[in-house]
Image (tube, coloured by chain):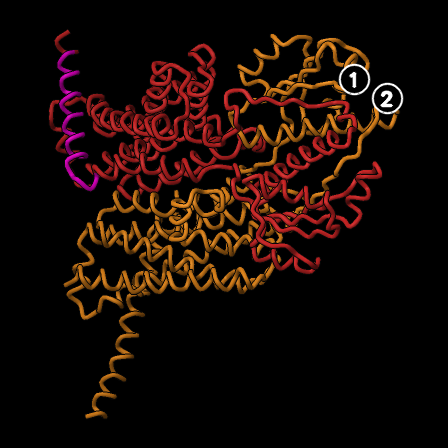
């Protein structure tokens, strides 16, 4: 019993020493605490697929009341911003090539006559496909505007509305704002980098500077040294996650519908896995530079193939299997579901057990390697 | 007097060249023998471009969806069959809302299409409704799904109209064409963007890590007591990494063209010229950071933070720049990646559009020059 207490005390002492070492240097303190919050703020604004300024140009060959009505509804939408009114078709290419307009709307010269005679009228839309996702979203917005135009036209001319109407609603994110999806996902993403790296580097640094040998001659057991290296990173990870969560709630005002307890449980498990990977890296790496490099090599695929920006279900099957060993993909799913849907632990088991497995595997392999090296 | 000055300067030049050559060959040898810089310069770009080229996609197909048919009238069943036939959906049919809701909550489906019990009756009256509930979490995906559902319902309505079961009303038709990416393949813009990310990361990391290591080990100080001057050290350090980074760049472009089949419609020379400028900038940022913090750990983290993450989020590679708030958009103007993304997306997909190439290249050139002067000044200051 007393030996258990001793162990705990030793781990706490080591944790305290590590935290002091990291937090005492003002530069490293800043580099740990400021970036997650600043990134959450900037990326919260930047990382959105929603468009609020669509630069467009119009080539109106009809010059009729109907075509003017369509263009006026675009101008009045608050999203479409007219950058040019074209006279010739040859101007379209110049405008699009130079990226001055995302869309060019061409209205056929028979537009109004066709509408009045009950035929369907054509509007041709040309989009700059250099970012085809943005272009697709803009085309979608334009189609919505045309749908509204159609409905109003039917009403104004006493025509029957289309026989079938689609009434769409979005759950958990009623206004379909990308931000609601992106920022909760960042809680894990922004903490992973530094948690993992901090762990990997702190061991590698001690080894490179020779202080690791000094640690070994103290009464600490290998397990205690490992725990002492893991705890500080987890503490810093929790603080960082809390910072991002505060930005999401207080600054961006995204309603948190879940339970903080569930979220903390998920995040702790995730941080444990991240720290486990960091420890494993530091056990494999001989120098700081190698530890650094290995963490970089892992961080990139972890963060890009996590489902943060592009959906996992759109990835090829082989890559989808790879994401199964990515702790971040589970963390992002957990934070999003707890944050937006209020999912409880029951619904999250499929995310929680892989995280626990990753943590258990990496921690036990790392601890085996540590004790093996130390003897 | 003037003769002696000219001889001394003509003596100085070969000596300078000799010193630079010696430094370059020493650095090159060191680089080739150091597995970590080879890993950053060659292995990292290859892994990244392969993994992300295959992995990243915004194309959405096989959307799992629940179709609730509350009363199986012929019209309702025919509409539901439209979802079965569409390549974009993987539908699950249910008879009521309860199980469908459960599926949505468990993330087994992304949306629910409800064909209400009174669908056929109201269709005869001309005001039928189909309800769609999408999981709004991923707003981009939700919007695309909504568009697909609209498409299926539209096709069904047109077929009904053709069979004379419902009357069409005059509608404005939108015929949209996507220039530069006719097949609407998201890898067309993701792969050139990835080239930017990879070059940013390897350029910055190469110099940041290596220089910081020299500062940490004090080997830079021992270089200083030799007759080598500070700008010669800079040149000697940068050149080998420049070549290494260009090698990584070549690997990226080759895989973009031959593996991912992204068309290269512009000229290779424009591509190469712009990329050389960009590599210089990335190396310069790494140099600046490392001579500022002189610590491998902080240098590499800073490099990640100030180069890679902004290049990912703020360069226009994925997210539209025009839609960002003004303050954030102003920040993007300071990022070299922004100009490089614009260049690469145009040169790959649109061709040699000089109205895009010239301004962006000029900005990159100015940034490269400023960084070169800046790191020289910083180097001098630290040496003094």
Q: Which residue is mark 2?
A: B165
Q: Residue at x 16, y 62 (%)?
A: B383
Look at the numbered disc 2 and give the secondary structure of its residue. Answer: loop
Q: Position of residue B169 (x, y in %)?
A: 80, 31
Between discs 1 and 2, the one toward the N terminus: 1
Reply yes or no: does residue B326 show up in magenta: no
Q: Quadrant of the C terminus of chain A?
A: top left
Q: Is residue A241 left or right of residue A336?
A: left
For this rendering, which residue is in front, B383 or A223?
B383
Q: Give the extent of the magenta segment.
A: A5-28
Q: Residue at x 28, y 55 (%)?
A: B288
Q: Quadrant of residue B68?
A: top right
Q: Which residue is mark 1?
A: B123
Q: Colour of chain B?
A: orange
Reply yes or no: does residue A7 show up in magenta: yes
Q: Position of residue A283 (x, y in %)?
A: 29, 32
| Chain drawn red in the picture | A
Query: Rounded to the nearest whole Å, what is the CA distance between mark 1 and mark 2?
Result: 9 Å
Look at the numbered disc 1 and give the secondary structure of its residue. Answer: helix
Q: Position of residue A227 (x, y in %)?
A: 23, 23
For this rendering, which residue is in front, B327 or B234?
B327
* On screen, residue A359 above or below A115: above
Decide: marks 1, 2 in contact (CB < 8 A)? yes
């Amino acid at each position: 019993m007393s030996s258990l207490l001793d162990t705990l005390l030793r781990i706490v002492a080591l944790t305290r020493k590590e935290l002091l070492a990291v937090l005492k240097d003002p530069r490293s303190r800043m580099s740990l605490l400021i970036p997650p919050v600043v990134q959450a703020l900037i990326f919260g604004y930047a990382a959105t697929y929603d468009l609020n300024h669509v630069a467009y140009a119009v080539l109106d060959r009809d010059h009729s009341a109907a075509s003017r009505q369509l263009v006026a509804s675009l101008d009045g939408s608050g999203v479409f911003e007219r950058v040019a009114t074209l006279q010739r078709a040859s101007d379209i290419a110049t405008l699009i090539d130079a990226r001055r307009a995302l869309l060019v709307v061409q209205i056929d010269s028979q537009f109004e006559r066709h509408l009045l005679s009950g035929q369907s009228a054509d509007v041709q839309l040309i989009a700059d496909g250099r970012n085809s996702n943005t272009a697709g979203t803009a085309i979608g917005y334009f189609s919505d505007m045309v749908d509204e135009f159609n409905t109003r036209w039917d009403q104004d001319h006493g025509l029957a509305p289309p026989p079938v109407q689609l009434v769409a609603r979005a759950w958990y994110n009623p206004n379909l704002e990308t931000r609601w999806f992106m920022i909760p996902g960042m809680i894990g993403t922004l903490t992973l980098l530094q948690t993992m790296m901090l762990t990997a580097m702190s061991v590698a640094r001690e080894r490179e500077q020779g202080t690791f040998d000094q640690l070994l001659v103290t009464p600490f057991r290998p397990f205690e040294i490992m725990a002492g290296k893991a705890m500080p990173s987890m503490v810093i990870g929790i603080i960082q996650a809390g910072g991002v969560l505060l930005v999401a709630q207080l600054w961006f005002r995204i309603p948190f519908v879940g339970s903080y307890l569930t979220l903390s449980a998920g995040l702790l498990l995730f941080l444990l896995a991240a720290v486990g990977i960091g420890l494993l890296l530091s056990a494999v790496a001989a120098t700081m530079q190698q530890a650094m490099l290995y963490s970089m090599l892992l961080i990139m695929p972890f963060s890009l193939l996590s489902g943060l920006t592009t959906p996992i279900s759109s990835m090829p099957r082989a890559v989808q299997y790879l994401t199964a060993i990515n702790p971040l993909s589970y963390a992002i799913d957990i934070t999003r579901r707890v944050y937006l849907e209020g999912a409880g632990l029951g619904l999250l088991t499929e995310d929680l057990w892989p995280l626990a497995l990753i943590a258990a595997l990496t921690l036990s392999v790392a601890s085996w390697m540590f004790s093996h090296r130390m003897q | 007097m003037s003769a002696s000055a000219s001889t001394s300067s003509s003596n100085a030049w070969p000596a300078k060249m000799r010193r630079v050559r010696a430094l370059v060959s020493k650095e090159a040898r060191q680089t080739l023998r150091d597995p970590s810089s080879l890993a950053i310069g060659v292995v990292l770009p290859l892994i990244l471009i392969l993994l992300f080229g295959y992995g990243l996609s915004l194309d959405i197909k096989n959307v799992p969806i629940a179709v609730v048919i509350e009363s199986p009238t012929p019209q309702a069943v025919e509409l539901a069959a439209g979802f079965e036939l569409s390549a974009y959906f993987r539908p699950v049919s249910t008879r009521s809302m309860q199980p469908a809701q459960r599926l949505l909550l468990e993330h087994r489906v992304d949306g629910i299409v409800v064909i209400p019990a009174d669908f056929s009756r109201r269709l005869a009256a001309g005001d039928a409704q189909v309800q769609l509930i999408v999981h709004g979490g991923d707003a981009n995906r939700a919007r695309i799904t909504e568009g697909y559902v609209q498409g299926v319902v539209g096709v069904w309505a047109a077929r009904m109209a053709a069979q004379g079961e419902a009357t069409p009303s005059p509608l404005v038709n939108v015929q949209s064409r996507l220039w530069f990416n006719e097949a609407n393949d998201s890898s067309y813009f993701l792969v050139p963007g990835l080239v930017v990310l990879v070059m940013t990361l390897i350029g910055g990391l190469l110099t940041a890590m290596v220089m910081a290591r020299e500062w940490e080990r004090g080997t830079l100080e021992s270089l200083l007591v030799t007759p080598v001057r500070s700008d010669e050290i800079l040149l000697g350090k940068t050149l080998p990494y420049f070549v290494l980074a260009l090698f990584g760049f070549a690997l990226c472009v080759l895989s973009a063209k031959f593996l991912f089949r992204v068309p290269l419609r512009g000229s290779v020379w424009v591509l190469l010229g712009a990329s050389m400028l960009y590599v210089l900038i990335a190396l310069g940022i790494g140099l600046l950071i490392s001579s500022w913090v002189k610590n491998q750990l902080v240098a590499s983290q800073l490099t990640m933070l100030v180069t890679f993450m902004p290049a990912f989020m703020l360069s226009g590679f994925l997210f539209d720049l025009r839609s960002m708030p003004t303050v954030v958009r102003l920040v993007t103007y300071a990022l070299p990646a922004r100009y490089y993304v614009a260049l690469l997306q145009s040169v790959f997909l649109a061709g040699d559009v000089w109205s895009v190439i010239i301004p962006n290249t000029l900005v990159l050139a100015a940034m490269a020059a400023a960084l070169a002067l800046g790191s020289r000044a910083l180097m001098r200051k630290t040496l003094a």
